Image (tube, rainbow, N blue to C red):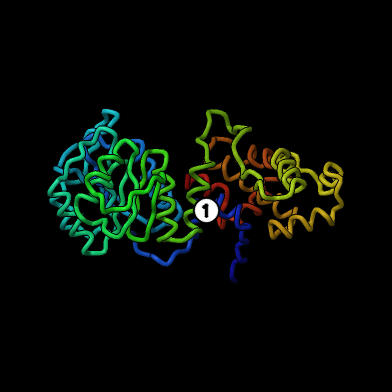
């Protein structure tokens, strides 16, 4: 006897719950090898922001999307701009022997901008092997010094723009906070590093993965000491939606423990049931009742994987009439029991 087919979340809710669903599809099945080259006094916030995107993507599939490596100019630890030492996997002499798909040069405000011959050699070899090359903060200076930026645009921290233009007048330097091309990508600071990596991911793996990672990094909150936190975030209504629909979505989000009936919602917004159904069909491609159920299941998933509330408490907090009903609905959408979901956090 075959098990019933698992129900699919609507697109926005699917992205919201992707790290438990683990069914992101992408053409590239084998993990990509990514090398971060840490220069002395590299920007720790820029590095961790870029790294966070890749690590989060790996949570969305049993086989990781990325294998991550760190390299210093020499073997050993590298001092960051925060005075924190990071132990690099190896020195640059080892990078030339590795099979790497993407190299990211990590600069920083106090990184000395002088060409590093061994780094230039590694970057030129990587370029000949069609390796994708990127940079953080002022790392694009070293890409330019290696001679691998001809025909490519890039950006750099504003403090270093004058030196870059003086040293490499033939190259096109953008004032944008990030520039992402098929073969090259760069950003100016820690604030733009995360968006740069999301866009680089989007180009390689598609919008589905990038938006799923963006949903998690933008919205997820750590667990609190209490069993659940009343302010745990759910998807905010799209500002492009009609005001009436946004009001309905907010009503739903604010009434999860005791869900409103469609008749009650209709009375609150002075729209007929049919008008509400048309709004959901036109703008969300679903029904009000299904959206409301997915919203409650999303909150349940947050509570199960981030907090310590019991399954009975989660059942009540998300407006289900019994733990049996809750478990049945949860399994329908996530393909696993609430207990199994809690174990996977």
User: In this image, 296 relative to 269: left or right?
Assistant: left
Coordinates of residue 44 in the picture (x, y in percent): 32, 36
- In the picture, measured across the screen, residue 84 lies left or right of residue 282, that is left
The residue tagged 1 is 18
Q: Please, which residue is most extreme toward the bottom here? A: 1
Residue at image position (68%, 42%) is 318
Q: Quadrant of the N terminus?
A: bottom right
273 relative to 253, above or below: below
Q: Looking at the picture, how far across and down is residue 23, in whole percent?
A: 50, 60
Residue closest to the eye, 200 or 97: 200
Q: Quadrant of residue 275?
A: bottom right
Residue placed most toward the observer, 270 or 192: 192
Residue 227 found in image quarter: top right
What is the crowding at mark 1: few (fewer than 14 residues within 10 Å), some, or many (at least 20)?
many
- How far across and down, in percent of the image, does residue 256 sit? 71, 41
- Residue 36 shows up from this direction: yes
Query: What residue is shown at x 54% (from left), y 35% (from top)?
Result: 308
Numbered disc 1: secondary structure: helix
Question: Is the residue 28 above or below the residue 305 in the image?
Answer: below
- Camera sees residue 52: no
Residue drawn at x 15%, y 52% is 94
Residue 96 image point, x, y percent? 16, 56
Pick the front one: 293 or 26: 26
| Count of marks, rendered view | 1
């Amino acid at each position: 006897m075959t098990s019933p087919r698992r129900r699919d979340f609507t697109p926005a809710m699917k992205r919201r719950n992707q790290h438990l669903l683990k069914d992101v599809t992408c053409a590239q099945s084998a993990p990509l090898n990514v090398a971060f080259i840490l220069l002395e006094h590299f920007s720790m916030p820029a590095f961790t922001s870029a790294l966070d995107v890749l690590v989060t993507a790996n949570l969305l599939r049993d086989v990781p999307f990325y294998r991550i490596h760190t390299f210093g100019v020499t073997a050993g630890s590298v001092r960051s701009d925060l005075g924190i030492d990071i132990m690099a996997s190896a020195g640059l002499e080892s990078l030339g022997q590795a099979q790497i798909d993407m190299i990211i040069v990590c600069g920083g405000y106090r990184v000395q901008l002088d060409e590093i011959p061994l780094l230039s050699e590694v970057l030129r070899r990587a370029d000949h092997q069609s390796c994708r090359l990127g940079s953080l903060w002022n790392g694009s200076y070293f890409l330019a010094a290696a001679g691998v930026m001809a025909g490519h645009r890039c950006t750099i921290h504003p403090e270093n723009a004058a030196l870059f233009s003086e040293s490499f007048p033939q190259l096109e330097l953008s004032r944008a906070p990030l520039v992402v091309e098929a073969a090259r990508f760069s950003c100016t600071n820690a604030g733009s590093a995360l968006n740069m990596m999301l866009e680089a991911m989007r180009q390689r793996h598609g919008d589905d993965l990038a938006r799923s990672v963006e949903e998690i990094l933008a919205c997820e909150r750590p667990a609190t000491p209490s069993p659940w936190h009343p302010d745990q975030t759910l998807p905010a209504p799209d500002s492009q939606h009609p005001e009436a629909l946004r009001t309905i979505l907010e009503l739903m989000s604010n009434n999860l423990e005791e869900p409103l009936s469609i008749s009650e919602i209709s009375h609150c917004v002075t729209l007929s049931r049919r008008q509400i159904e048309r709004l959901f069909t036109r703008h969300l491609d679903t029904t009000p009742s299904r959206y409301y159920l997915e919203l409650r299941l999303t909150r349940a998933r947050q509570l199960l994987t981030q907090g310590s509330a019991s399954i009975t408490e989660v059942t009540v907090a998300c407006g289900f009439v019994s733990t049996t009903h809750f478990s049945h609905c949860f399994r329908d959408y996530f393909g696993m029991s609430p207990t199994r979901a809690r174990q996977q956090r």
